[in-house]
Amino acid sequence: MATVLICRRFPGLSRVTAFSTTTKCKAESGSSKRKQKKEETPEAANAGTEPAATIQLLNPLGYKVLYNPSAYAKSRAASQQHAARNRGQALDGTFSSTGQVQSTFSTTSSQALPTIKNALPNPKFKPLLEQAVSAWPSAAQTKEEAEMEKTEMHDSKEDPRVFQKGRPEYRSLSYNKFELIEVLPLEAGDSILHSITVCKDKQSPETITDYFRKLSCLPVEQHAALRSDPRFHRLCSYAVESIQLFSTSELIDILKAFVRLVVPPTHPMLNAYENEFCRRVWDMNLDQLLLVADYWRCLERSVPSFLSILFSYANMHWKDLTLPQFVQLVYIIGEGRKSPTDLMQKLESLILKYLDSFTLEEVGTICLGLFKSISGISDHVMRKIGDRVTLQMEDMSSYALVNVLKMLRYTRIGHLPLLKQLGKVIPPRIPMINIQGIMHIALTCSSLHYYDEDILAAVAMSLPSKVTYCRSKDAAKFLWSFGCLDYEPPNEEQFYSSLIEQMHRKLHEFEKFPEHLLTGLLGLAFVQRFPDELIDYALSNEFVQKTRESKYELRKDLFTLGKSVEIECPGYKGSRLSPQLCKEITEMVLNFAKEEIYIRPEIVEAVSLLESMLGGPEYVKSHMLLPHTRSSDLEVHLAMDGRPIPFNFKDATADKKLKDIGVNLTDDLLTQLIKGRSNSQSPVEVENEAKAHGQERVEEAQAPCTGGRAAFSDVVGDRLKVWPKSQRPLETPPSPVLAQQPREVKLAIQVSNRNHYCYCSKRLLGLHSLKRRQLRQLGYVVVELPFWEWFPLLKRTRVEKLSYLHYKVFNPALLSGAG
């Protein structure tokens, strides 16, 4: 079932006006590879003049939906085939394929639009937030819509437990909600409750345990009434009062009854049970401990103390863990979001021990448990897991495969065979995977900088029809992933407009998760899309204050967005970052660059050689032309005739103060120092002679540069007649030619590295593509020293490096293009 939402389309959100959110804001000097903006359709043009009704499929609050545990499965048939293939033994009917089991539950839709109370107090953003909230079931839901809704329903509690159906051993380690039980008649339940009332003496532990077992077998629709019945409360009180008299197996049976009856995790009596189980840990076996931990998980109760003791127990007995016990333990570790460091190091060896024996679902469970608990594993182990998955990926369920991708992303392992196989297997499955699974696939590609057009195109084509199921996080991650990889899909207008609309719908969620809004907007900025209304909100004082309250450092993201808008959107009239905040972030970024970027060997070497080649530090400046892009540049100025122009006098002066102290030593000067000053020369004459020698050497060093590439060949032939900086005079008088300030070309030399490009390719990532685009818009000519050329040269001779740099800097095409 689904509901229909009818809302008024506000003029401010029309396709033509406020859906400047889907308009590319491009400068005339932008990258030539970008396609020209498509013309607006007549329908879009009319949308700005008349109110229109928008019909949107949503899930109403508290509405009953069908739940399919195999949310990521390729199809129901495929899920059944996979379960049969990976089931080590024939199982009875209680462990049937998840595709055959459906149950109903009440859910709160994450797609519901915000009510007016969720709107921001600032009336400036009211048009973005006002949306209708009336919703009712639709009787006209198509079969396709029903199937899509079932695909999209993801149960974060049940889906990770699918692996437990693959082996009969898990029956003793976990709770099975599909276990066949004999339903207790209502009359028998009333009889039990009545006996509790009439019996004045406390019941024995055996009797109390039996009561709980039987009452938990009442029809599901009677459980809510039972939990609120005073007689049931009295039974619970009896059990707490006698809790130490119960055997461990009886306590476990009572806890199982609580799971069946869906006792609230905050119920006060559960405190007593948690404490009692903590006290008994060392008297229980590992199967019992894992089973109790699983019951607590099913109750959705956090029990950190119990888990801590369980992990200590497992740490002592880790060598005795069977394969099912090990997998169940990793599952519990993941669901508890707790990573016992000393234990995880030991469990790595068990992963390698059992790796070939795991079912594919168990491999996915291992990865999910490690990912949820933020447990790092060695590159070696992750690569072994990748090897196993690569060989059997076609037989793996999409849910398990996505879990492997999560861990691959977390460990930052570029497992190329796995990624290539992913490009063959996953695109046909994309339409049958739910939106969160698709998001993790796209995010894995972007996190690993892996560009696969087949995967990205499949994601883009399937997303518009699923976009209303996106959380704010999902929409933001999609935008970031595509922007990071600088990929524009075939349906780019539909793809981006649908996601931007969803960002508008989810605007209220960004109050709690401001990082998601910045993530999405930066992804859009990478591909030259600047939705002005969302940017206006993101740069407002109210939102900036929310970023300060976030647990993440978001100031640099704000800075990147704000400065990009300044450069690429000259007509933007909305909110801007305060000058004080920009200054604060700039200082932070520059301080980081001084400590981490400027000192990198490839940059230091390039600066040193350029200074030697061009004539000194006043001709080169190593700094950040665009601090908001967080990478460095080597700035060089050339006259239109190719002659270098000095401009970095501040750094040059500082360099001279440190290194050019004293005068140049000549043979005559040494003779005078040893034998005494000649009677024919005064001290002033000696100093002038030394300066003259120094000036001649500077002119020799600069002469090759004024002659362009031909003159430089003479330098190479003569083993580079460039003198050390320590031999230059303290001050070099400016040339009369330089004083004329001729028209100049400003070069922004980029010393790139592998992290600027997609994995195993020469395709620039979005941030660095944005940077070069903005440098061109500011009038710079971008010159790159690509890592695949420059890094090998670092091991070659000085002459070869200087020859390469001369070719790059004095390339005639740069001057002709600038002219």
Image (cartoon, helix red, strand yellow):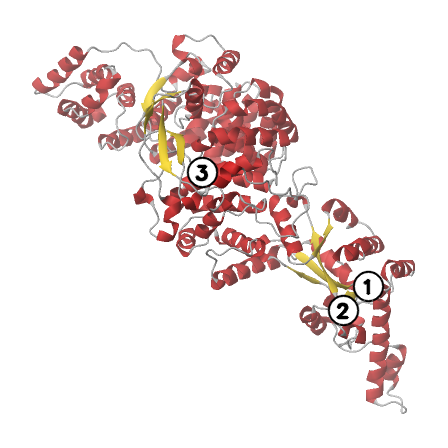
Q: Residue furthest bottom?
A: 679
The CA distance from mark 1 to mark 2 is 10 Å
User: Can you give x and y, in whole percent of width and height, for residue 310 in the image?
Assistant: 38, 30
Dot 1 amino acid type = Asp
User: Is there a contact, CB below 8 Å, between mark 1 and mark 3?
Assistant: no
Give left or right: position of 507 versus 652: left
Image quarter hosting the N terminus: top left
Pointer 1 or 3: first along the chain: 3
Tell me the residue that label 2 is attached to: 742
Residue 776 in sight here: yes
Task: Tell me the element at label 2.
Answer: loop
Give the vertical position of 795 relative to 472 (above or below): below
Rate crowding at label 2 as few (under 14), some (14 to 19) or many (20 or more) other CA atoms within 10 Å.
few
Task: Tell me the element at label 1.
Answer: loop
Q: Residue at x 50, y 27 (%)?
A: 366
Tell me the residue that label 3 is attached to: 502
User: Can you give x and y, in whole percent of width and height, for residue 251 in the image?
Assistant: 27, 22
Task: Tell me the element at label 3.
Answer: helix
User: Can you give x and y, in whole percent of width and height, for residue 61 in the image?
Assistant: 31, 31
Dot 3 amino acid type = Gln
Dot 2 amino acid type = Pro
Give the vertical position of 581 relative to 147 (above or below): below
Tell me the residue that label 1 is attached to: 641
The CA distance from mark 3 to mark 2 is 52 Å
Rate crowding at label 1 as few (under 14), some (14 to 19) or many (20 or more) other CA atoms within 10 Å.
some
User: Is there a contact, CB below 8 Å, between mark 1 and mark 2?
Assistant: yes
Nearer the observer, 298 or 761 = 761
User: Is there a contact, CB below 8 Å, between mark 3 and mark 2?
Assistant: no
Give the vertical position of 60 relative to 646 (above or below): above
